[in-house]
Image: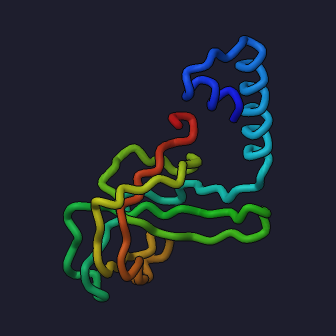
Amino acid sequence: MDVRNKIVHGKTATDDDAVSALDSGLTILRALNALPKETNVVFHSGVNLFRDKDCLIPIANAKGVILETTSAGGMVKSFRIFPSTQIHFREGETVAWEWNMQNTWGQAWYKDPDNGVIKKAWDSSAEFVGRHLDAV
């Protein structure tokens, strides 16, 4: 903060000031990276979505992405489906938790790709756009 204040208020920051600020930033980054976080892996992509509970009226402008989510502690796994217009999803890849809040859908249903059972997808959802973690 001292380095920032010196620069913002027109004073000169020394090389030692810059190194100290960088060291503090790296310490904070390491602490954040050490926090447990949930992981989201693409389980199925390109799932057909429907506007009705009988799966007769397709949603033409999106496909479903089913994510296998593992809790931050690693003890709980769940499956969630989200709409997307993106086509980059590959099964087995870990993706970032990223959204396009400008693109949304109302209620939707889908047929589970593993057993064909009709399931409610969501009541409303924004578009999931999660990039592969290697691209983030």
Comparing 24 with 69, the one in front is 24
Image-based side of 73 in relation to 129, left or right: right
Above or below, 97 relative to 124: above
Comparing 127 with 79, the one in front is 127
Q: Residue at x 79, y 46 (%)?
A: 34
Image-based side of 117 in relation to 15, left or right: left
**Quadrant of residue 36 within the rendered picture:** bottom right
**Quadrant of residue 100 within the rendered picture:** bottom left
Instruction: State the image coordinates of residue 97 (x, y, percent, origin top left).
Output: 52, 54
Q: Residue at x 29, y 59 (%)?
A: 102
Instruction: State the image coordinates of residue 59 (x, y, percent, origin top left).
Output: 23, 70
Q: Quadrant of the N terminus?
A: top right
Comparing 28 with 115, the one in front is 28
Instruction: State the image coordinates of residue 9 (x, y, percent, origin top left).
Output: 56, 27
Above or below, 123 relative to 22: below
Q: Residue at x 73, y 27 (%)?
A: 21
